[in-house]
Image (cartoon, helix red, strand yellow):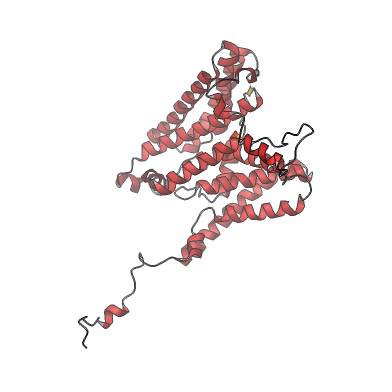
């Protein structure tokens, strides 16, 4: 019986498959991911402290929450810094925005009797204005964002000190805790979550209790929830939305992106607003936790955020990086800071480690990118 199918030409049978249809091996995909180096670093640091800090309490429930809370505070601002750096810009005013936002919350509440929610909204409004101004000046003047935001680093810190001394005569303002109960907005930045779960775990004997039978660890700090939530949202935006593509395009080649219809100016302004927003979230969490504001809060936090982002695989030139990588960079930061404390090592060496980690991360990221390009 003859087949009705027409014979295929020999040339067609030998034709190479379209590279767009070829399946890419998992290892090649992994080499191209920006957070690969940060993941390897996290595993290395975690393994090191599992061995060195064994029996110190670092990996008890309370110890784990301690280093996660340190990581969360940095991770909140590192997430926004990651998106901005992927978009090809820097924001050196993040730390100063933290200090100013705290003052804008504390003074109206303590000195003038404002409800806490109104002061928080004031802080976020001013942060949005600062972020939009940063973005507008960068776009309008063509100056590097490094220069523009460096100027705002001093302007905002000076405003925090000047306003605080002018209105209160001091640079530290306390008395916030008494305004916390019943405030609907402050509840988003204070306290813990999953307290019922931890109480149930204590009743089952899974976590330790104190003399009164209450769990030693009562819940998950709200800062960790903010960190995980912002990281998840930023990752979804980068990977699943057109806006995420615009961010990568704006950082990779702004002129080409603009010629392709990407609203580069609006994208960059929105990213600066987001970094100011994240700095204000950080400030709110600190003010609600400590019950006070201080003009020097947030000092050098912008540099720590950049280190976390670079460790997370982002390029300083823009167009490449991830929010997950920034979260892993912040986690490494928290592990090392608390690990040094638990092991009793002199904390003066912590900054040495940060500088070394930055250099190693840049070298490793460059190496992995070369390997990824060779594997294509």
Could you tell me residue 24's position as x and y percent? 43, 65
Residue extending furthest toward the front = 204
Q: Quadrant of residue 167?
A: top right
Q: How many marks?
A: 0
Could you tell me residue 201's position as x and y percent? 68, 41
Identify the image quadrant of the C terminus.
bottom left
Could you tell me residue 258's position as x and y percent? 32, 44
Residue under the image location 62 percent in, 45 percent down: 331
Residue under the image location 55 percent in, 46 percent down: 326
Classify residue 272 as left or right of residue 95: left
Compared to residue 194, the image places residue 29 above or below, namely below
Identify the image quadrant of the N terminus.
bottom left
Q: Is residue 98 visible?
A: no
Residue extending furthest toward the bottom = 1
Residue under the image location 64 percent in, 44 percent down: 333
Classify residue 67 as left or right of residue 89: right
Q: Is residue 41 visible?
A: yes
In the image, 118 versus 139, the foreground residue is 118
Could you tell me residue 350's position as x and y percent? 71, 43
In the image, 259 versus 297, the foreground residue is 297
Compared to residue 275, the image places residue 157 above or below, namely above
Compared to residue 219, the image places residue 17 above or below, namely below
Q: Quadrant of residue 4?
A: bottom left
Residue extending furthest toward the top = 112
């Amino acid at each position: 019986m003859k087949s009705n199918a027409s014979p295929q030409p020999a040339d067609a049978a030998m034709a190479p498959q379209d590279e767009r249809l070829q399946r890419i091996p998992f290892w090649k995909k992994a080499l191209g991911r920006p957070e690969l180096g940060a993941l390897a670093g996290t595993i290395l640091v975690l393994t090191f402290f599992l061995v060195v800090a064994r029996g110190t309490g670092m990996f008890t429930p309370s110890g784990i929450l301690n280093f996660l809370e340190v990581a969360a505070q940095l991770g909140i601002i590192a997430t926004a810094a990651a998106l901005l750096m992927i978009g090809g810009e820097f924001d050196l005013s993040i730390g100063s925005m933290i200090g100013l936002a705290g003052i804008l919350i504390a003074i109206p509440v303590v000195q003038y009797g404002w409800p806490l929610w109104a002061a928080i909204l004031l802080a976020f409004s001013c942060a949005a204005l600062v972020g939009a101004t940063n973005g507008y000046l960068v776009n309008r003047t063509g100056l590097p964002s490094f220069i523009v935001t460096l100027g705002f680093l001093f302007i905002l810190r000076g405003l925090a000190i000047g306003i605080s001394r002018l209105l209160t005569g001091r640079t530290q303002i306390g008395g916030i805790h008494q305004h916390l109960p019943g405030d609907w907005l402050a509840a988003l930045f204070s306290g813990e979550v999953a307290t019922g779960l931890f109480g149930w775990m204590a009743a089952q004997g899974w976590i330790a209790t104190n003399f009164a039978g209450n769990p030693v660890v009562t819940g998950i700090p709200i800062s960790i929830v903010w960190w995980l939530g912002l990281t998840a949202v930023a990752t979804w935006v980068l990977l699943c939305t057109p806006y995420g593509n615009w961010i990568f395009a704006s950082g990779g080649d702004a002129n080409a992106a603009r010629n392709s219809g990407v609203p580069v100016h609006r994208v960059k302004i929105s990213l600066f607003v987001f970094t100011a927003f994240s700095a204000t979230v950080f400030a709110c969490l600190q003010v609600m936790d400590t019950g006070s504001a201080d003009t020097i809060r947030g000092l050098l936090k912008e540099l720590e955020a950049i280190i976390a982002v670079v460790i997370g695989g982002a390029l300083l030139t823009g167009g490449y990086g991830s929010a997950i990588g920034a979260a892993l960079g912040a986690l490494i930061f928290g592990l090392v800071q608390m690990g040094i404390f638990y092991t009793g090592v002199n904390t003066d060496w912590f900054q040495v480690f940060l500088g070394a980690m930055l250099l190693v991360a840049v070298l490793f990221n460059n190496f992995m990118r070369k390997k990824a390009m060779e594997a294509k």
